[in-house]
Image (spheres, rainbow, N blue to C red):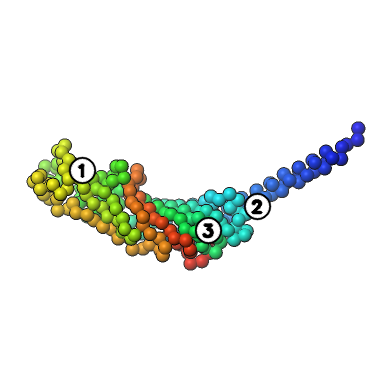
């Protein structure tokens, strides 16, 4: 029986298509891997963290896009970044990044551990520990000679370049009292003077980066930022 030339042609075309798809996929993965390595290396040089830096390209066919000068959407995470006498974990998400270091903007989050938050509370933090609950900051410990257990709830607010911790209520001996009513509890006199709002300025933000909100999470105090379109925050040059 003589072979069908049409079947042979279809087989050759299918094999060629599969080979091209495999090569394209391999090229894409290789280019994507190299781009991620370069972005992570640049972020590491800029941020100088204690821990690892990871970069992910989240746009489909991101590797092939780099050949045309586009990277697409990028997420960079770094652990142990030192800023303003604090150590934080940072995640940056940028849209439509190009290989010449520009983007369509994005967002960032910085998480500060509660142990560091406690140290920034000054005298109010002496002998007390910070944690989070429903987005608010909770400061718990003992006060006075009798070591009375107390819990302070504080709200968080932000401006473009600072966040403020504002104590709102105090729970002591099973009774919850608004901070402005503490005069009714003489035992809290030493604490009352410390329960004033505390503002922490963020003075090292790159151009185009703005603080938008603050809240508490399981791992610590989370600061949210917006990033304007233009040069990516950690650059003055290329990203890949």
Which of the two residues, 187 or 212, is positioned nearer the viewer here?
Answer: 212
Would you name the residue on which mark 2 appears?
27
Q: Is residue 7 visible?
A: yes
Please tell me which residue is depicted at 87% across the width and 37% down the height of the picture: 4
Q: Quadrant of the C terminus?
A: bottom right
- Asked if residue 43 shows in the view, the reply is no
Which residue is found at the position 36% from the left and 63% from the top?
204
Residue for badge 1: 151
Secondary structure under badge 2?
helix
Q: Residue at x 22, y 54 (%)?
A: 197
Q: Which circle's residue, 2 or 1, is located before the other in the chain?
A: 2
Classify residue 187 as left or right of residue 235. left
The numbered mark, 2 or 3, whose residue comes first in the sequence reads 2
Q: Residue at x 53, y 50 (%)?
A: 58
- Residue 175, image x and y in percent? 15, 38
Q: CA distance from mark 2 to mark 1?
A: 58 Å
Residue 69 in picture, x, y percent from top left: 59, 61
Q: Nearer the viewer, residue 99 or 53?
A: 99
Tell me which numbered mark, 1 or 3, is placed earlier along the sequence: 3
Q: Secondary structure at mark 3?
A: strand
| C-beta proximity under 8 Å, tags 2 and 3 | no
Q: How many marks?
A: 3
Looking at the image, do the residues carrying marks 2 and 1 touch, with CB atoms under 8 Å apart?
A: no
For label 1, the SS is strand
| Foreground: disc 2 or disc 3 | 3
Question: Few, some or many C-alpha atoms within 10 Å of disc 2 (few <14, some 14-19, many ≥20)?
Answer: some
Q: Are marks 1 and 3 in contact (CB under 8 Å)?
A: no
**Disc 3 target residue:** 97
Asked if residue 151 is positioned above or below residue 162 in the image, the reply reads: above
Q: Mark 1 to mark 3: distance in Å?
A: 46 Å
Q: Residues within 10 Å of mark 3 (few under 14, many from 20)?
A: many
């Amino acid at each position: 029986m003589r072979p069908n030339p049409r079947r042979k042609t279809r087989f050759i075309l299918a094999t060629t298509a599969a080979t091209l798809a495999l090569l394209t996929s391999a090229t894409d993965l290789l280019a994507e891997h190299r781009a991620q390595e370069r972005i992570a290396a640049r972020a590491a040089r800029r941020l100088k963290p204690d821990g690892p830096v990871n970069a992910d390209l989240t746009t489909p066919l991101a590797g092939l896009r780099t050949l045309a000068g586009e990277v697409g959407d990028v997420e960079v995470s770094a652990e142990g970044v030192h800023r303003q006498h604090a150590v934080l974990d940072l995640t940056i998400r940028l849209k439509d990044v190009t290989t010449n270091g520009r983007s369509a903007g994005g967002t960032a989050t910085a998480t500060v551990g509660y142990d560091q938050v406690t140290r920034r509370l000054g005298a109010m933090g002496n002998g007390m520990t910070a944690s989070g609950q429903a987005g608010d900051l909770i400061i718990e410990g003992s006060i006075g000679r009798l070591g009375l257990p107390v819990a302070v709830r504080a709200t968080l607010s932000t401006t473009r370049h600072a966040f403020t911790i504002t104590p709102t209520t105090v729970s002591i001996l099973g009774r919850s009292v608004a901070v402005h009513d503490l005069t009714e509890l003489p035992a809290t006199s030493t604490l009352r003077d410390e329960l004033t709002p505390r503002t922490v300025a963020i003075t090292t933000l790159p151009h185009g980066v703005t603080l938008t909100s603050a809240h508490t999470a399981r791992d610590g105090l989370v600061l949210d930022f917006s990033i304007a379109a233009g040069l990516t925050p950690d650059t003055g040059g290329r990203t890949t």
